[in-house]
Image (cartoon, helix red, strand yellow):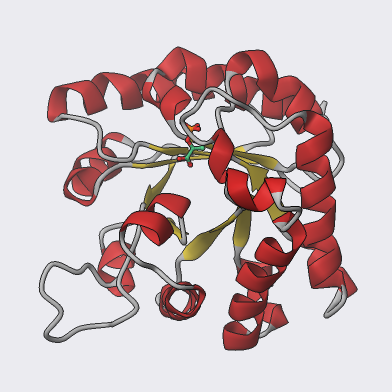
Amino acid sequence: MRKPIVVGNWKLNGSSADNESLVLGVIDGMRELNGVDVGVCPPFVYLPQVEKLAEATDLGLGAQNCSEHDSGAFTGEVAPRMLHDIGARYVILGHSERRAMYGETDEMVSDKVKAALSAGLTPILCVGETLEQREADETEAVVRQQLAAVISGNGIQAFEHIVIAYEPVWAIGTGRTASPEQAQEVHAFIRGQLADHDANVAQSVRIQYGGSMKPGNAAELLAQPDIDGGLIGGASLKSEDFLGICRAAADTVG
Ligand code: PEP
């Protein structure tokens, strides 16, 4: 049985005051939650604030990106060892917004995964197709290629320490969610790709769904056999919405 994992991606949102009420609300609601890993990924500058608020709780802390480098002349970058140093557990890598807007290639994502793993972080590796690619029937080819780069750069055993997020780009921030059947189909495909290398790793890896997941659609998505949680954008900015999804994930555990 894979433990569900729900992580909030705050993107470029937040302020000291808003973060405090959001995080305290999430922590409060988490008291009634069992059997689910919950995390939040604020912008870099707010990580220490959230780390302090979440101290001695089960709320996991994550970043939204990191450098593939450990140190050196890389102005504006943040090394994964620095994230680990300030208490982060997760780092989102290869988010479609970074691939599309900041030119991150599959190879760069693979290098970042390697750096994050060496620093002791759990990468949340995002994969997913654009609407154009889905309509051209290229979903599997795109996802296969995104995974293959990370498998060839890190080896299949690395996936024992990676969480995958399947995020169809056309469903991110659009209000348009993949149907449970559409999502399940790709999640099963992802697991199958890993199983071609190692069946045990494939069975144990957790695969989140991301793309307009909300309290109202979370239960049916999370009921799918290969959907093990959610990566949540918009709905992670309100504690009640985020907790509604976390509760739906906890309900799948029974
Ligand atoms: C995301 O950006 O990872 C995401 C899933 O966003 P949203 O929930 O807003 O679609």
Tell me, yes or no, if residue 125 can be seen here. yes
Q: From the viewer's side, name the closer residue of 233 and 137.
A: 137
Q: Identify the residue shown where x is 59% and y is 27%.
A: 213
Q: Quadrant of the C terminus?
A: top right
Residue 109 placement (x, y as % from top left): 46, 72
Residue sitting at x 70%, y 45%: 135
Q: Could you tell me which residue is drawn at 74 percent across and 21 percent down? A: 219
Query: Is residue 140 toward the left or the right of residue 26 in the image?
Result: right
Residue 70, position as x, y percentages in the image? 27, 82
Residue 91 in which image quadrant: bottom left
**Position of residue 23 measured from the top left corner of the image (x, y, whole percent):** 33, 27
Q: How many marks?
A: 0
Give coordinates of residue 35: x percent, y percent. Answer: 69, 35
Report whether 136 appears left or right of 106.
right
> Which of the 4 image quarters holds residue 169?
top right
Could you say which is closer to the camera, residue 152 or residue 51? 152
Can the viewer see residue 253 in this picture? no
**76 relative position to 47: left or right:** left
Determine the residue positioned at 55% across, 28% down. Answer: 212
Vertical placement of residue 22 versus 196, above or below: above
Q: Nearer the viewer, residue 46 or 105?
A: 105
241 lies above or below 124? above
